[in-house]
Structures are given as structure tokens and as C-alpha cells.
Amino acid sequence: MITGHGRYTEDITPPGTVYAHFLRSDYAHARIKSINTKKAEEMPGVIGVYTGKDFSEHLNPIPTAWTIPNSELKIPKYRAVAVDRIMYVGDPVAVVVAESPYRASDAAEMIDVEYEPLEPVVNPEKAVEKDAPQLYDDVPGNVAFRWKIDAGNVDDVFSKADVVVRERFVNQRLQPASMETRGTVASFDAGTGETTVWMTSQNPHVHRFLLSLILGVPENRLRVIAPDVGGGFGSKISCYGPEAVVCYLSKLLERPVKWMETREENFLSTTHGRDHVQYLEMAAKKDGTILGLKAKVYANMGAWLSTAAPGVPTILFGLILPGQYNMKAVGCEVYGVLTNTVAVDAYRGAGRPEASFIVERMVDILARKINMDPAEIRLRNFIPADSFPHPVPTGLVYDSGNYEIALKKAMDKVDYYNLRKEQEKMRSEGKYMGIGISSYIEVSGLGPSKVVRSTGFGLGLWESATVRIHPTGKVSVFTGGNPHGQGEETTFAQLAADELQVPMEDVEIIHGDTGMIPFGMGTYGSRTTAVAGGAIAIASRKLVSKALKIAAHLMGVDESRVVYENGKFHEKGNKEKSITMAQVAMAAYGAGADEIPEGMEPGLEQTSFYDPENFVYPFGTHICVVDLDPETFQVKIRRYVAVDDCGTQINPMIVEGQIHGGVVQGLAQALYEESVYDSTGNLLTSTLSDYAVPTAVEIPRIESSFMYTPSPHNPIGVKGVGEAGSIAAPSAIVNAVVDALSGLGITHIDMPLKPENIWKAVKKAKV
């Protein structure tokens, strides 16, 4: 990428390519009365104009892959192109195919659609009211699912509490806003009956499976390739209608068809993230011992249930609500609500940021209620370091950790107690300074298939790897992980090089092509190093084991007498009698009687399908120190200290980069970003001019340090790091701002903490 030789979907244009452009609805909720395409069809360069009715017999509804059990789940039949009803602004109504993208776009403007406007609903709490507009006849009350857990008899635990604190939170809707928008190029080969699909995907094999369901064709007739992908943050996990439409049109026209999303389309039609209304209660003893937590959540799912959408506000959110705390009970009730907005699905952290935020906010609210220091109440309630593996009420088993040390290390780095003294002095002078703590944990390394399948996910989340040493000694690693900005190509090359004891520059990483990779579940959920890396390590170790047998045969010694170190096999106690891995590889492919043992298969290649025994649980503490301008209420981050534990680190520089990137996105949520719909369903933040993505100017220095508690649940001890910053940062920053204003009696301000929102809270507090 750095040298300018990256190849993205936009760069792929097979000979004879034609271009698709989607006409999208300007209404959030409407019936389609008629569509007149005559003028568009007559435009120069136009090959065809197609409406929802043209696809209704050929494309199945968009599938939902996470069908959570015991939730009264109702999956609405949402089509790739609307047939008779519009569900959100940006819903595809028709598609034009032309010889150039510009002609396709111009022709789309000539399509005449007559609508019958219907009343929209965009707020999840309003959508469940009795008189709310109904989006689908088979989803009464707009509630697609109701998921509930009562872990540890929460009502009984609450009845024994001395103190109960309550708060309402809005975890605002966010736009993933990856640098590259979505796109698809499909090329049907009439000779083989195979369609090759280049697309912006985080998980090509899963996309192939979902596309096969929509198109009604066997998977082996689809080859999905993800070239370089310019970020995704969860939004490129989902399968969208336009991808299937492009594949169908390529077969129909017998020409390659290309579609690239504009930035405005990206804001309108690519899945958003978060969007919860949350009601929380926390029960405690008067000495600060936390007993339990209750959560009632209205999760805005948008106009349809996207690929993994039902699992995000339920499994990924509810099961991690205990956080780092040794509480006895957790109750959680989640309503998945359909609205006239674009669908909500995974966004960096996917359920974990929403959970960690409310837990860390409630701990601060409780501390203030009983007049206890926020650090002290955490130290009192942490799960003890000697109790791992530790089962929590929701059924998860945390693998390893030392939460107390992480907090104390962060406190030492920020000089916590002296900051508190400074804060007292500043308050006496009418100045606002705040200190915010976020002690987070996340479930990652997704993960063990038996557990995942029991939650209703459509596939197990194991991972595959094939490691091949060529006759020359060079190495190819084929991985089901699909890196798209995480630096995993480097990490995997280091991992394989270390395991095989070969130079890193001799290792190539191959990913993102269903025609070359055995199978793969993709990259998301901080799973790639833990699960895909685990598969690479196992395959590499199996390969070294085979190579050792060949080396022993070549050297004429028993294999128990052979040692492999520094890229050479040698006899114990006799380093002079040695053979290199490259020599072993040549013998493996030569396969003569004097080269490999009797009965051994030729070649030097091993495959692993690795299914981890459990999830992994990264953790840490972030502390943010802020100063507020008393006149403008602008938030200035004075210091941001992060202490993280992601287990074994293969490449510390990449790990730190992932922490920084995550913190920036968490900071963006805390202070700047929000996707806003008006009451008619129009997206007011549909461009980068309206949606405030922070730039380098707004980002503070992030002071990173680490702990190293290996996970026992995978062969390399890693825990995952990609989402840690986005989980920890929002609560650290909001806790700091609320702490600065706590002298005014302010207990909470919803994100984003724009100066206007802070000013309103201060004004209300002073009345």
C-alpha cells in the first residue's frame, strides 16, 4: 500500500465491463405506486433498467445469519431491490446498467417513481408504542426479537441491596466511515458456469455462502475474492442486496458488471453501529460491594435484520455485562426494534463497547452516590487474580487476568492521587478538571464453534490455515483470516517465520480468495491473531514434525535424536551433522527412496482447521484527564493513559497501533460522531461535512503501556487487541467530563459530548 501498488476493488475492471447504478428512495417509508423507466432506457449507453419486480423471482430475501434462540425472533423478508414498499431513505428502487458509470448515473435520474408516502418511525422507543407505524405485517409491534437473561436470580440479589442507582443512557448511532466504500465486480463465465466476484469483504467465504443463498446457486459456482480492502470496522461483514444484484446481472448480460458505492451511498445504505436506548440499575452494599446489574435495552435494528445483527445487542452485549467485577447477578432484557433507518450491525467492538460503557458509567455513578473514590470502588470489586479461570453469572468463563495491577499501573502513570489534590484546588478556583477511569474487559477470539452455534450463529467460527514449504525452501501461508488494515500480513509472516525458523522475507501470506483458501471465517471480533494465528501455528508445528522425520531419515539417525533450531536439523550433541529446512523440502518433493521414509506422503504441506476451546478475554484500564473551558465548554484532553493486556504480543508496534486506532474511534464517539435522522427519516449526517470524523488535530497523545497475561485457550497465548481502544475510550472520556462537572450535581451527559450538549447540562444543573 505504502508504495502505491495496492489493488482495490475499484482498480479491477475486466474487459467488457459495464456499470451498475442504483436509484435510491428519497422517502423513509412509502408504497411504490408505479415506476416508469422508459426515458432511462432510451438514454445513450444504457444497456438495461431493472426494478424490484425483475429480481423478485430470481433473488431470495437477504438472509440473517445469527438467529438467536429463545427470543421470539421474527426475520422480515427484506429484498435486494424494493418491490412494492420502501423502508428507509436510500432503499434501492431500481438499477441501471450502462457502458459507463456516468451514463448509468445520468439515466437513473430519468426514472420516474410515483410513491404513496407512509408515516415513518426512526426512534426505537417510539416504534414499540401501540399507535406506531408498522413496518412489516409479520413483525407485530416492530419488535423483531426479545432476548432476556436472568443470571443469578437478579431480583433476589437486588432485594438485599443497601443502595440501588439508576440511569438512562443513549448510545448513539455511528457510521463506520471506512476509507474505502463498498463495491462489487462480478464476471460470469458461461463456459464454466462460475461467477468470479471481487468485493470489499471482511469474510469472503461467508460472503460466498450468503450470496449462494440469495442467488440460489451452489457455492462452488461462486469464487469470491477480496483484494486489498480499505477498512471495514464491521460494515463489510454483512451481505448486502447490491452485491447479489451485480452477480445476477453479470449472468443475465454475460458481461462483467461493476458497482462502486459513492460516499453518500455509503452513509445512507451501509450498516451503521450502536444505537441503543438503555435503562440501567446497579445494586450494592453501603460499603461499595457491587451485587448485581439490571439492563433494559431498546436496540434500533433499522429496517431489516442484517447478517449478524441480532447477536450484537444480545450475545455480544449481554454476556459481558459483569465486566471486571465480581458481581453475583445480571439481568438483561433486549428489544430488537425495526425502524425506518438503515440497518444496524457490527461496528468496531460490536456490543462490547455498548456493554462496557454502561458498566463503567454505573460504577462511577455508584461511587459518587456513596461518596467513594472511583478507583477505590473498582479495586474493591475486581475479580481476584487467583480465581482464574473465572466463571461469571452470564455463563462466560474468563481465561486469565490481573485487573488490580492494570488499574494501579494506570493510576501510577497518571499520578492519580496528586491529580485528585489538584482537582480540589481547581474546583475552589471555579475551574473544571476531571479524571475518568475505564476498566474494561472484552470477549474476543470468536471463537469456539459449539458455544457459538448454541447461540444461534449460522456457522462455527473455527479457522483454517495451510502452510506450504516449496522445494526451494520458501514458504506460502494460506489463511482464512482476511486482513484489511490490521497489519496481519506482517504478524502472520512473523508467526510462521518464528514457528518454522525461516527468514520472515521467505514467507508469503495468501488470503481473501475462496478459490485458493480451504475455508475461512474472516476478520472481525479481534479474532484473527488468536484463531487464524492459532491455525497457522498448529499447521506450522505439524509441518516441522514431518520435516523432522525426513531430516532424521536423511541423516540416518532416529528422529528422537534430532533437534531443530535456527533453521537447521542436527543430531543431539553433534551440530556438525546437520541439514537445512530447504534441503529437507527438496527431499520431500523429490520423494525418492533415499529421501523420505517408507510410507510417507511426498510434499511438505500441512493444513489445520483450528477450533478454540474457549473465547479469550483481553482487558485493561484507560484513564483520561480532561480540562473544560468554563466559557465554551470545549473538552481538552490533557492526558490519555492506556494499560492493556492482550496476552502474547507478536509485533508490539502493530499492537500499539491497534490500541491507538481504537482509542481514536472511541474518542470520536465520545466527543464528535453521531448519525442523526430527523423525524421524517432523512439522514442529516449524510456527508463527511456533516458527520464529524476527527482529524489528527483533534487526537491527543496516547500513552500506551502493556501487561502480558497469556491466554491458555490458544497455542500462542494471544488475546486480541483490535477493538480494545474503542471499548475503553468512550467511558474513560465521559467519566472524566462528568467528574469535572460533578460538583454541579451532574451525573450523566449522553454522547457525543459536544460543547453545546455540555452547556445544556450545566445550564440545567444551575437552574
Image (cartoon, rainbow, N blue to C red):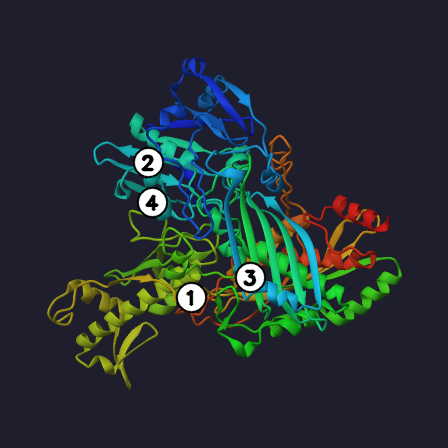
The CA span between labels 2 and 3 is: 42 Å
Mark 2 or mark 3: which is in front?
Answer: 2
Q: Residues within 10 Å of mark 2 (few under 14, many from 20)?
A: some
Percent across and percent down for residue 601 are 16, 65
Which residue type carries mark 3?
Glu
Q: Which mark is residue 215?
A: 2
For residue 15, what is the image quadrant? top left
Q: Which residue occupies 53% across, 33% down?
A: 134
Q: Residues within 10 Å of mark 1 (few under 14, many from 20)?
A: many
Q: Mark 1 or mark 3: which comes first in sequence?
A: 1
For the question of whether residue 446 can be seen, the reply is yes
Q: Mark 2 or mark 3: which comes first in sequence?
A: 2
Which residue type carries mark 4?
Phe
Q: Mark 4 or mark 2: which comes first in sequence?
A: 4
Q: Which residue occupies 38% across, 68% down?
A: 498
Report the residue that reaches farthest toward the bottom.
573
Per the image, the residue denoted by label 4 is 209
Percent across and percent down for residue 519 are 31, 53
Which residue type carries mark 2?
Leu
Instruction: Please tell me which residue lies in front, 582 or 746.
Output: 746
Per the image, the residue denoted by label 1 is 614
For residue 545, what is the image quadrant? bottom left
Per the image, the residue denoted by label 3 is 656
Identify the secondary structure beneath mark 3.
helix
Instruction: Please tell me which residue lies in front, 151 or 595.
Output: 151
